Image (cartoon, grey):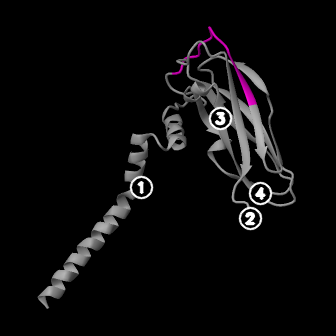
Amino acid sequence: MQTNFQLMRKLLMVSLGMFAFGYMLVPLYEAFCEWTGSNVLSLSERESKNSMNGRAGMPLNTQVDTSRTISVEFDTNVRGPWNFAPMTRSLNVHPGELVTVMFEFQNIQNRTMSAQAIPSYAPQQAASYFNKVECFCFNQYTLAPGEKKLWPVTFYINPKMSKDVKTITLSYTFFEVGSSV
């Protein structure tokens, strides 16, 4: 009888330990990802939210460098049957200036489709200075047959970026997610 109570107590402790571990798993995972830098998209989202003040979404401590201009070109690629294009192909921005560019999406299939966009940058070192405050690339979207949407990208370029960089190309590849075909 005594051994049954000891066994029950040990099993209860193991169960409580498993529950505590499961409960702490999300905070531990977030801390680990932040420490290793492996969850880059959510970190940039959190930094964008933390750097906002009350003035129309302007990041804190960002000063516009009007002494130089950077040309930003927008490129789109599709992996699937839809139309995807920026409303503006290129524009000139000052580092630190908050800019919004709209992208148009249209599902040209006769079926509902889910898709997501993945960004890339040229030159590659510009990626760490190109700060997106809002971007359709943060989420997946479902488009009904023939549905057309406009989605924004709001960004600023960190003024600390090298003065040698005169042009940045932001390219998005839009592809279907979870296709059953």
Q: Residues within 10 Å of mark 1 (few under 14, many from 20)?
A: few
Q: Secondary structure at mark 2?
A: loop
Sequence-first tag of 1 and 2:
1
Instruction: Note whether 123 is above or below 37 in the view shown.
Output: above
**Residue placed at 30% from the left, 73% from the top?**
15
> Which label sits in the foreground, 4 or 2?
2
Please tell me whether mark 3 or mark 4 is closer to you in this view. Answer: 3
**Is residue 72 inside the magenta stretch?**
yes
- For marks 4 and 2, the one nearer the N-term is 4
Looking at the rendered image, the disc whose residue lies closer to the viewer, 1 or 2, is 2
Quadrant of the rendering where the C terminus is positioned: bottom right
Q: Residues within 10 Å of mark 4 (few under 14, many from 20)?
A: many
Report helix, strand or loop for mark 4.
strand
* Placement of the N terminus among the 4 image quadrants: bottom left
What amino acid type should be assigned to the residue bearing mark 4?
Met
**Amino acid under disc 2:** Ser
Q: Quadrant of residue 172?
A: top right
Which residue is under mark 3? 120
Q: Which residue is mark 2?
A: 180
Label for residue 26?
1
Which residue does the numbered mark 4 point to in the structure image?
113
* Residue 148 screen position, x and y as percent: 83, 47
Percent x, y for residue 129?
56, 25
In the rendered structure, which segment of residues is drawn in magenta?
62-74
